[in-house]
Image (cartoon, rainbow, N blue to C red):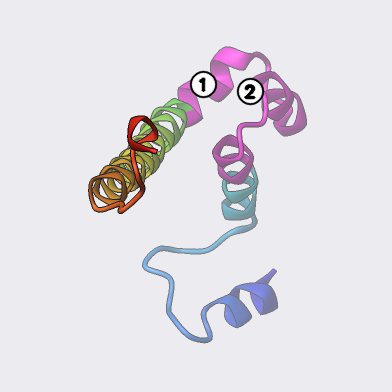
Amino acid sequence: MDTLAERAQKDKLFTHAFSPHCLRHTFAIQHINVGTDVKLISKWLGHESVAVTLQHYGNWIKETQKLAEDVSRDANAKMMAKVTALRNQTNTDRTNSSATPLGTL
């Protein structure tokens, strides 16, 4: 583990002590971040119950949820801006069109 920690700190030193337990936390947090069921994470970590896992990682779950909501809100805002721009462009194109109205043929 020491060699792994030394390699990991090659470019940037850790701001806290490193231990194999850090890898355990990293494993759990990475699974939380990708939405793995907490029941599975709890089982993999060998916790007595899901409540223990939630006690240790509940803040990460809330933070991940907030991040997902922020990303979704930003993506939605960008999509709506594009839709508005396309609508405006379509309306401008129709206004500037030199097509002959059907009734004048």
**Residue 83 painted magenta:** no
Residue type indicated by callout 1: Leu
Say left or right for 96 vs 99: left
Residue found 36% across the figure and 48% down from its top: 99
Q: Which residue is mark 1?
A: 54
Residue in the image at 67% along x and 24% along y = 37
Q: Position of residue 38 (x, y in %)?
A: 63, 23
**Observer-nearest residue: 80 or 54?**
80
Q: Is residue 19 above or below residue 88?
A: below
Q: Of helix, strand and loop, which mostly describes the magenta segment?
A: helix
Which labelled disc corresponds to residue 29? none
Residue labelled with disc 2: 38
Q: Quadrant of the N terminus?
A: bottom right
Q: Quadrant of residue 63?
A: top left
| Frontmost residue, 57 versus 105 | 105
Circle 2 SS class = helix
Q: From this viewpoint, which residue is outermost toward the bottom? A: 10
Whether the residues at callouts 2 and 1 have beta carbons within 8 Å, the answer is yes
Query: Can you say which quadrant of the picture contains the C terminus?
Result: top left
Tell me which segment is drawn in magenta.
Answer: 28-57
